[in-house]
Image (spheres, grey):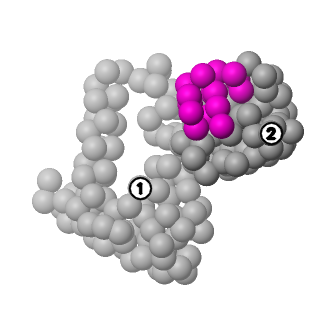
Amino acid sequence: MKHWSRLLKSDPERGIRALLDAHGGLVYFTVRRILKGYPEDDIEECVSDVFLYLYRNRDRLDLEDDAMKAYLQKAATHRALDHKRRIARIPTPVEDPVWDAGAADRSAEELALSRIEREELIGAIVSLGDPDATILIAKYFIGMKGGEIAAMLHMKENTVVSRAARALKRLRIQLKGAENHG
């Protein structure tokens, strides 16, 4: 008997609702076990993704009723692990010691000057063009490692390191030139 598969194909909305009622707790439990410590929103989004995946792939499903429970649990496991990997790839921003440290102790004029200097620096970096600007911003403003930048830009890590070193030299020359003319 392939009740779930038939129901999902003939009346998808009713089929998803029925599966959610019958096996939603199992999917939630599976996702929550893998994403323990993550915000509840992430867990709920992942559970929704499992049922959305099932809905989108309903035409390819031809499962026996007793296999649907195992399929859902496996799908929940894969979705939760994918979610965990995706979150792990998002780099945490590097703290900016110039901007953040002692901001309360500085005058408005000092803060404005600091902001102007920062904007000039970012402008100078952007003027280097891609991929050098991307490499420097990823490394020094976002805090990504050479290997992560290389993967993001589809380059070799040693190429990223070399380009970063050359870009820093060009940036120093550019900023010294601006300092001498300003």
Which residue is label 2 attached to? Answer: 1
Q: Using the image as rendered, state which of residue 8 and residue 162 is in the foreground.
A: 8
Relative to 5, residue 12 above or below = above
Relative to 137, residue 100 above or below = above
Give residue 34's position: percent from left, percent from top: 81, 38
What is the CA distance from the residue labelled 2 to the residue labelled 1? 57 Å
Of the numbered discs 2 and 1, the one sitting upstream in the chain is 2
Is residue 167 in view?
yes
**Residue at 68% in and 39% down:** 5
Label 1 is placed on what type of residue? Ile
The label number, if any, that marks residue 151 in the structure image: none
Check the picture and name the quadrant holding the N terminus: top right
Name the side, left or right, on which 96 lies relative to 24.
Answer: left
Q: Using the image as rendered, state which of residue 88 and residue 97 is in the foreground.
A: 88
Is residue 92 in view?
no
Question: Which residue, as the protein is rendered here, is positioned at the far front?
Answer: 1
Question: Are the residues flagged by discs 2 and 1 in contact, CB closer than 8 Å?
Answer: no
The label number, if any, that marks residue 137 in the structure image: 1
Label 2 is placed on what type of residue? Met
Could you say which quadrant of the image residue 179 lies in? bottom left
Looking at the rendered structure, the secondary structure element under dot 2 is: loop
Give residue 77's position: percent from left, percent from top: 78, 43
**Segment colored magenta:** 6-20
